[in-house]
Amino acid sequence: MTDFSKDQTRLIGIGGTNGSGKDTLGKILSERHGYFFMSMTDMLREELKRQGKSLERENMRALSAEWRHEFGLSVLVDKVKTHYDELANKDNYSGLAMASLRNPGEADAIHAHGGLVIWLDADPKLRYERIRANAQSRGQERQVDDDKSFEQFLAEEAAEMNRPKGGDAASLAMSEVKQKSDLIILNEGQNVDDLDKKIIAHLGF
């Protein structure tokens, strides 16, 4: 397995396919390994709510592209890192972890800060079943996102994996994040402990 330095693991960016466990990994790093964790997707949801818009994936894609056009490809990483850097107690944390990277510029930003990019994946059917099983616990406001058929789930993921025809640098291109990742983990275990064991083995916690 690849050995990663202590400096690299102080900043961890998490990407991956939908339902692969990105937020779960963030919570593992937070609750078990002392990291400060933020979800960039949650930031987009909060802004959509502020604007009175529904939390559909199409709206999140449009908002993230709008921000990238206005503030640069690293805008979401920059927002999270600025928030972390301004914390009065940040020295109490092992580091900063953020999810979910969906544009290669975000992976580049993590690397520019000396950090590590992790990509999670799993069988599509398993990922879909996870999302459906967790739909109730994820809150009513996300029901519009979770209440989809398997075919819709696959179609929406395809729209985010590859840059759309005519899309520019601000478009989602998750496959390009995967190409820039330092570590790829197949998360097909039955519980949180299985994923944590893989993280410990790879990162040496």
Image (cartoon, rainbow, N blue to C red):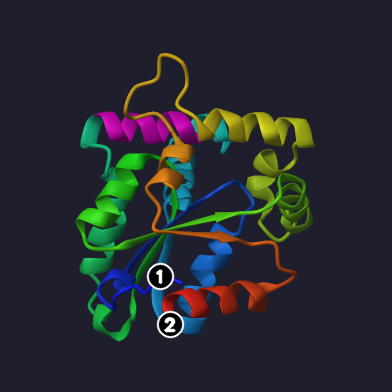
**Tag 1 residue:** 2
Q: Which mark is residue 43?
A: none
Q: Classify residue 152 by image quadrant.
A: top right
Tell me the mark number nearer the camera, choosing from 2 and 1: 1
In the rendered structure, which disc, 2 or 1, sits on the residue that comes first in sequence? 1
Residue positioned 56% across, 74% down in the render: 198
Dots 2, 1 in contact, CB < 8 A: no
Is 169 displayed left or right of 125 in the figure? Answer: left
Can residue 65 be found in the magenta stretch? yes
Is 56 displayed left or right of 151 in the figure? Answer: left
Q: Which residues are magenta?
A: 60-69
Residue positioned 70% across, 36% down in the render: 153
Residue 87 image point, x, y percent: 25, 72
Q: Name the quadrant of the C terminus.
A: bottom left
User: In this view of the protein, which residue sits in the foreground, 140 or 61?
Assistant: 61
Q: Is residue 184 above or below residue 147?
A: below
Mark 1: give few (<14), some (14-19) or many (20+) Cα within 10 Å. Answer: few
Question: Is residue 52 visible to the viewer in this orientation of the structure?
Answer: no
Question: Of helix, strand and loop, which mostly describes the magenta segment?
Answer: helix
User: Amino acid type of disc 2?
Assistant: Gly
Residue 83 image point, x, y percent: 27, 62
Mark 1 residue element: loop
Residue positioned 68% across, 39% down in the render: 144
**Tag 2 residue:** 204
Mark 2: give few (<14), some (14-19) or many (20+) Cα within 10 Å. Answer: few
Count of labels in the image: 2
User: In this view of the protein, which residue sits in the foreground, 1 or 63?
Assistant: 1
